[in-house]
Image: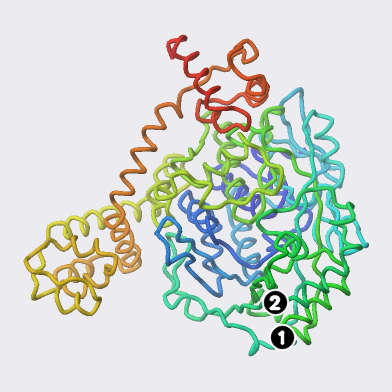
């Protein structure tokens, strides 16, 4: 039997990040996947990032993960979303060439020392008592390991639905994984079902693009990785389309054959990414819904119709598609479909993503009830880091809600659980002005560097960036500017002119002005920025502008975070008998006994634990002298 330190099961986004991280941390790693040819497949939309998801990709990159680098190497369009809002809401999004994305990931994995790939299906987790020992595969092989990370995606007992037709499958054209769920159920795990879906893929040669609204990329496209410097020179446009009343009427004709409305699908679907039939029911007052027409790559004519996911009968999908302007003559490559699959409620995990029932067994990705490439990838990264830390006898690596969106996501999963596919939003983060996409490297790279995952080059760039930001900020706060220097520029921007000399920073604080406007009137500042590494100059100037413009908001949020941390990090002893604390509500006693939170902060976020219950716990700890 072959032996490894870490075995990763599944070659999706969670599995790829997990395998890469474990191997980069220096332990022998095996990635087992059903089909090596579909590693890092973009099963749904061909894009990375988006609202809050873009922040997660940048955090993965800052920690030394690979998703940002792969995205930059395969992107065909870049857009910064929410530019009209504050920087806490800015979110990067990249349209990718899905084939190149998968090829890039595979090339990276195949060239990492300590990592081996194996095509097979895992049917059993090998356990001795309550400790993981390895896995057994469909081929009859056994692999021994000190830690196992399961990242099975939608493949566990996956079932595909198109109208009244259904069949077993993890993705259309690929078989589901059977047997593993049953074994985990026998070990005592709770198993439930969720549902997701995807739209038709359309032959771009049959789309009337002149009838659609073009959506170009940003004029100055940015990157996801803090290491990337190669500019994106040529961008491919996306397009906007809209359903109409006739489209909705056609869709309704298929409801009596819809697996969702006839009860054949039992799993809950994603509330924030519903199927088109779900949209027209839930938003019956709307005459139209916006659709995004997204190219799937440079070497294919295939287009993804974002917002048109459906499991209705094929003929209904086609008729409804043909009723949309621009798609009157559309031909499709494959239908939209729903998929129902097993997941394991994540309240069965610790904050390291290690299962509470089996030591050394970790779950990451859709197996935990999440949806989205980005949410899956960050879980794979964190599970692998913690698996390696445990193998090496080192402390766990857990990010808090004040440190990262990743910390928010994992805390939500473990303390609250899910009853529908979990998707990250900026609104889920209490401290989002601290967790901006522009400062992810400064927040997280030093932590990862200490682990040995983020390499010296990353840390060097962070330190260089911090020094440059300090220098530019100090200059802005110290440099004077006279009316003769500034007033012509101020008049052009319709902002009050100067009557006397002021510090340069006072102009930057005006909402009408940007860093570029300040550089225009200050030769000294321009000369200073010319000494900054050109690869990072724009990024540094943007960070300085955000830090100074929003300084009071940032400081206020940091004060709130620090104040809450006073109780947030109060440790709860493992020996507490919650049922013995009669002052707690009965629901709180049940939930706390089941969840076994490690801190007051974690306890406070458990559904059913009220502020009054939290007060009881704090009083109890004070009596213990904690």
Provide the secondary structure element on which disc 1 rests: loop
Left or right? Give the position of 535 relative to 626. Answer: left
Residue 262, relative to residue 516: is it above or below?
A: above
The residue where tag 2 is placed is: 303
Q: Quadrant of residue 605?
A: top right
As measured in the structure, the alpha-carbon distance from the residue carrying label 1 to the one carrying label 2 is: 9 Å
* Mark 2, other Cα within 10 Å: few <14 / some 14–19 / many ≥20: many
Residue visible at 35% across and 53% down in the picture? 462
Kindly indicate whether the residue at mark 2 contacts the one at mark 1 (C-beta within 8 angstroms). Answer: yes
Left or right? Give the position of 269 relative to 572. Answer: right
Residue visible at 61% across and 31% down in the picture? 350
Residue visible at 59% across and 78% down in the picture? 238
Q: In which quarter of the image is residue 577?
A: top right
Judge depth for marks 1 and 2 and give the one in front.
Answer: 1
Q: Nearer the viewer, residue 125 or 520?
A: 520
Find residue 140 and report its horizontal and vertical position in percent.
87, 43
Q: Residue furthest front?
A: 285
Q: Which of 128 and 87 is in front in this view?
A: 87
Residue visible at 80% across and 29% down in the picture? 187
Left or right? Give the position of 131 relative to 333. Answer: left
Label drawn at residue 228: none
Q: Nearer the viewer, residue 276 or 87?
A: 276
Q: In which quarter of the image is residue 409?
A: top right
Provide the secondary structure element on which disc 2 rests: strand
Find residue 246 and report its horizontal and vertical position in percent.
78, 78
Name the colour scheme.
Answer: rainbow
Find residue 266 and report its horizontal and vertical position in percent.
84, 48
Residue 159, relative to residue 172: is it above or below?
A: above
Q: Earlier in the sequence, mark 1 or mark 2?
A: 1
Q: In which quarter of the image is the C terminus?
A: top left
The residue where tag 1 is placed is: 207
Residue 127, relative to residue 19: is it above or below?
A: above
């Amino acid at each position: 039997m072959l032996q490894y330190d870490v075995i990763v099961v599944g070659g999706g986004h969670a599995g790829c990040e997990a395998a890469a991280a474990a191997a980069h941390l220096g332990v022998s790693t095996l990635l087992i996947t059903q089909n090596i040819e579909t590693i890092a497949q973009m099963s749904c939309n061909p894009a990375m990032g988006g609202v809050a998801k873009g922040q997660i990709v940048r955090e993965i990159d800052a920690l030394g993960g690979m998703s940002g680098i792969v995205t930059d190497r395969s992107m065909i369009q870049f857009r910064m979303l929410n530019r009209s809002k504050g920087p806490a809401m800015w979110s990067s999004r990249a349209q990718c060439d899905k084939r190149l994305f998968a090829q890039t990931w595979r090339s990276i994995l195949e060239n990492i020392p300590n990592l081996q790939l194996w095509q097979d299906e895992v049917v059993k987790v090998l356990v001795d008592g309550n400790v993981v020992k390895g896995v057994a595969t469909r081929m009859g092989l056994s692999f021994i390991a000190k830690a196992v990370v399961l990242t099975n995606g939608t493949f566990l007992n996956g079932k595909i639905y198109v109208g009244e037709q259904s069949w077993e499958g993890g993705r259309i054209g690929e078989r589901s994984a059977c047997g593993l769920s049953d074994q985990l159920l026998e070990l005592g795990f709770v198993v439930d079902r969720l549902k997701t879906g995807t739209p038709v893929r359309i032959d771009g040669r049959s789309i009337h693009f002149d009838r659609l609204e073009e959506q170009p990329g940003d004029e100055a496209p940015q990157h996801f990785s803090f290491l990337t410097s190669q500019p994106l020179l040529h961008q491919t446009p996306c397009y906007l389309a809209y359903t109409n009343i006739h489209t909705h009427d056609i869709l309704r004709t298929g409801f009596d054959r819809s697996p969702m409305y006839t009860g054949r699908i039992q799993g809950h679907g994603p509330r924030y990414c519903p199927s088109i039939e779900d949209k027209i029911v839930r938003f019956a007052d709307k005459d139209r819904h916006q659709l995004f027409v997204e190219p799937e790559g440079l070497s294919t004519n295939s287009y993804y119709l974002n917002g048109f996911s459906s499991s209705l009968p094929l003929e209904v999908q086609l008729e409804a598609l043909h009723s949309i302007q621009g798609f009157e003559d559309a031909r499709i490559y494959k239908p939209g479909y729903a998929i129902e699959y097993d997941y394991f409620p994540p309240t069965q995990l610790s904050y390291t993503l290690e299962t509470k029932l089996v030591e050394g067994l970790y779950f990451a990705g859709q197996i935990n009830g999440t949806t989205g490439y980005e949410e899956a990838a960050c879980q794979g990264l964190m599970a692998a880091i913690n698996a390696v830390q445990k193998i090496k006898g080192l402390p766990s690596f857990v990010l808090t809600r004040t440190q990262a969106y990743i910390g928010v996501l994992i805390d939500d999963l473990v303390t609250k659980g899910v009853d529908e596919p979990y998707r990250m939003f900026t609104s889920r983060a209490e401290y989002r002005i601290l967790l901006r996409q522009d400062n992810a490297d400064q927040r997280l790279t030093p932590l990862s560097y200490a682990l040995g995952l983020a390499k010296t080059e990353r840390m060097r760039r962070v330190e260089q960036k911090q020094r440059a930001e300090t220098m530019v900020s100090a200059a802005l706060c110290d440099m004077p500017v006279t009316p003769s220097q500034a007033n012509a520029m101020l008049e052009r921007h319709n902002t009050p002119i100067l009557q006397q000399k002021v510090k340069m920073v006072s102009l930057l604080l005006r909402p009408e002005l940007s860093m570029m406007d300040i550089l225009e009137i200050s030769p000294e500042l321009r000369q200073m920025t010319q000494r900054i590494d050109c690869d990072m100059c724009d990024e540094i100037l943007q960070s300085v502008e955000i830090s100074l413009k929003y300084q009071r908001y940032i400081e206020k949020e940091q004060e709130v975070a620090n104040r809450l941390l006073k109780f947030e990090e109060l440790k709860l002893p493992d020996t507490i008998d919650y049922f013995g604390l009669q002052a707690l509500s009965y629901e709180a006693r049940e939930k706390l006994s089941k969840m076994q939170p490690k801190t007051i902060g974690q306890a406070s976020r458990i559904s059913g634990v009220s502020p009054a219950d939290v007060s009881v716990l704090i009083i109890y700890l004070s009596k213990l002298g904690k």
